[in-house]
Every structure is written in C-alpha cells, then in structure tokens.
Amino acid sequence: MNLKISFNPGDIPQKPGVYIFRDRFGDVIYVGKAVNLRKRLSQYFQRSRSRMADPKLRSLINSIDSWEISPVKNESESLILESRLIKEYAPKYNVLLRDDKRFFLIRINPDEEYPKIRLTRIRRNDGSRYFGPFPKGNVKETADFLTRYFGLRTCRPDVPGELDYRHCLSSRIRDCCSPCNGKVTREGYKERVASLMKVLEGGCEEVICELRGRMDKAASEKKYETAARWRDMITNIEGIFGEKRRNFRFASIPSESGSESVKDLQTALGIDREPKMIEAFDISNISGQFAVASMVCFRNGRPDNKSYRRFRIRDVHQSDDFAMMNEVVRRHYSRKLAENRTDTDLIIVDGGKGQLSAALSALVALKYPPTPILGLAKRNEEIFLPEKAEPIVLDRSRPALKLLQAVRDEAHRFAISYHRELREKRIEESILDEIEGIGDNRKMQILNEFGSIENLKKATAEQIAERIPGIGLKLAELIKEKIG
C-alpha cells in the first residue's frame, strides 16, 4: 500500500457519500459509496489491508495514489452518484455496476417542432435536456400523467399532421392539445413544454396545489378511490421532482477534463487568458416578489461551492430583471474591490443583451478592472459579448458550450432554491395572519423570539405566553391550535 497517502480520519465527515480512488497517473480506478465515509475509508487505509487474502482488493489498495470524497444527504443520493460516476469513468476495479440496471431519465429535445416526454436510461450528447436519474417513485406513471396534464403529444411522427390527427385517440379523449390540427400554435405548445420543464426542475407547487384540490373534492364527494389516486400522484411528484430530491448538477458538466473545457472556452471567446475562475449570476423572482439572485463560482471547470453567494434584492422594488442584475453585480464586485480581490477571469450573466448591459454598466461605474464578461441566453444558447453586435452560437458538442451551460444551470438552480426557501417560509409564517388577535407587530415579536414556525410548534402554550409580552394563556392556546 502507498503509505505516502495523506489520510486523517478526523478530516472525513461521518456522513453518507461517495469516494473516488485514483492511481499515480490521475486515472479513476475505483468509485464506492458509504453510509459513513469516515468509517468506510478508515477500513482501506490500514497497514493490515495490504496483506489481505483477496488479490483484487490487495491490488486496488496497492494502486491508490490519491482519493477524494463527495458527501451527500442520504444513502439514496449516494447510490445515484456512485452509479453515475461509474458510468462516466468506468473504473477498472468496478465491475458490479457496469452492466447493472440504470435508473430512468426523462428526456426532452427542445429542438423538435413539438417536443414530448421520453424515458431513457442513457444520457447522450444529442442536444436534449435530461432530468434525473430517478431512483424512486413510479416515473413511468408520473411522466404519463404530466404528459396528459400539460396536453403534450405522444404520437410517433416527428411533425404530426392532419392525417395523424384522424387516427389519434389522445385528441378524442382530450389528453392532447392537438398541435397537428392547429388547435394550438407552435409557440403555445412550446409554452406548455416550458411549464413542464419547470416542474421537472422542482417547481411543482402549482401542480401539487391543483391535485390537492382534486383530492379534497373527491374525498368530500366520498369518492375515496379517486382521492387515493390523486394522493398517490401527489406523493410521486413530490418524491421525484420536489425540493427534497437533490439534483447533482455537476453531472451535466462536460465529461472532458475541466482544464480541456476551460481551454476550449478561451479559444471560443478569443480572450487573453484561460477562464480558470468563473463567476456567474442569475435572478429569480415572480412579479418582483421575493426577488433574489445567486452567484456561483467555478474553478478549473468545476463548482467551488464554498464561494457561492446569494442575495436578497434590496434597491429594486418592481419586476425589473435588468436593474436587479445591475444591483447584484455592483454589490458583489464593490465588496471584492474593498477586499482587494480582482481574481475573476470570466463573468457570466444569465440572459441576453439587456442583462449583459446592466452588469457591464455596474462594473464600469465601479471602475472594476477590465474583465471578460458574457450573457448566455437560454433559447438558442446564444453567447452575447459587449464588443460584438451579433451573438456567438457554438456547436452543441463543444466542451466550451457544455461548460457554459453547466455554470448557467448551476446559477439558476442556486437562485431557484433560495427563492423557494423564502417563499415557503413566508407561506408558513402566514398561518399567524389567520389568527384573530395577532397583528403585524405581534407576529414579528413571535418570529423574532422563536425564530421560525417550526420552533414555535415545539413550544407549549405556557412557554408562548411567558416569552411574548401581551399574549395570555388563552391566546397562546389558540396559537397552538392553529399551527398544529
């Protein structure tokens, strides 16, 4: 065994996760999962393990030159990540999962005239959007329901026409919006697809709310079997696409090495130095409510999670993405200037010319050192540069574009998660608004004292009355009754 490997058990978290072993050439030779990373890795790095009887394990241990870990939230996530990394690297010491059954992915090709949901087990570089993999829940049934819910087509033709309409059963039972017959325009159909993608990305609140209404209605009419079906579909959607299901976004990062993608991006943009340190911004708001922004950082083509930042929009009080982008860029880089840090090689903003101009004007106002900056528009993956009138469109197979997409998607995910967190916190806090005798001032007193509704639920009525001035035992008991 290579005893020069630095290993200190105290540096390893006692959490579920995945570990990767590399040989002296830097190649991945083994990927494994663990319920407890510290305990599992400690079993490898023992002198006695190099003298064990199993020749395969002995050979593996003697080949380890370096290792790395990726902690996750639970055992299910570690299984997904382990499977994904084994498929990506095909390590020579991993044999069990190479031909094992893969989890389902949902595939949508946005370049089709009328996109539709497809299920697959293999992710290909074909320009399609992939969601998953999904280790639990009835993915097939849920995908069928979402297809019907958004009225998308299920027919085989690439571009369905009038003849297909005559033989289509979906349109007759009103499951399909019938783009083949002109009942919906191409733009209207694409809007349905965009709404579907929001659900697949985790924004399933509206669908869940409607399904709860159907379930409650069926239950009130004593149609319990129907209510149970809606309940099961709610559980499926929440379990498969909901916030608690973690997406490993770095899986969409190019399979090429980070350095290769970075070099290709330098060539594609025609900039002087390699963009080894990239910072990207995204805005998330609904009609100006709970407006937030994210900043994610990639170093050498890989996420640097410790450098991520999130922002509440403070100065803009209307739905104006351009002004919000200007504010966030100004705040972030004014702080970097104050700290004498001008280490950013490339700045990316999510959007087109408007967002790019807003960010650029903030940098100019700050007199920030000249730094390459671009806007990446989602529709056709157009790259907007300050000095160019027309956008750059890269081949979808280029590592440079894949890296840009990965950075943009991670910024979007990070912004959406923060927006959802604030929105759900506000929804939860609104329970207090429904209690007679609780005004805005008293509500703020309660939240400031207990920190959250969750903590308030843990307190007794006596504790609430004791800790909040002006609230008697009777009102405290009413609060406990309402919040459950």
Image (cartoon, grey):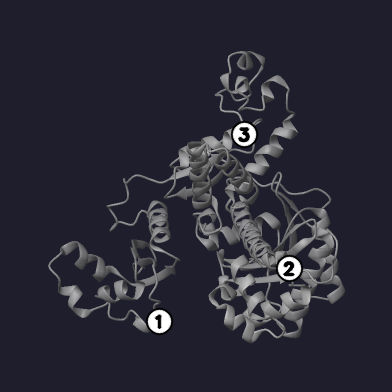
What residue appears at the point 70 percent right and 67 percent down from the top-left corner?
A: 435
Instruction: Answer whether residue 17 is visible to the viewer in this image.
Output: yes
Residue at the outermost left position: 53
| Camera-side residue of 363 and 460 | 460
What residue appears at the point 64 percent right and 86 percent down from the top-left corner?
A: 467
Kind of element beneath mark 3: loop
Which image quarter holds the N terminus? bottom left
- State which tag comes first along the sequence, 1 or 2: 1
Q: Which residue is mark 3?
A: 115
Which image quarter holds the C terminus? bottom right
Relative to 450, is 354 on the left or the right?
Answer: right
Residue 402 in percent (x, y) is at: 59, 52
Q: Nearer the viewer, mark 2 or mark 3?
A: 2
Mark 2–mark 3 Cα distance, whole angstroms, equals 50 Å
Mark 1–mark 2 Cα distance, whole angstroms, equals 52 Å
Q: Are marks 1 and 3 in contact (CB under 8 Å)?
A: no
The picture quadrant where one finds residue 58 is: bottom left
Q: Which residue is mark 2?
A: 436
Residue at the outermost front position: 474
Mark 1–mark 3 Cα distance, whole angstroms, equals 47 Å
Residue 436 in percent (x, y) is at: 73, 68
Q: How many marks?
A: 3
Kind of element beneath mark 2: loop
Q: Which residue is mark 1?
A: 11
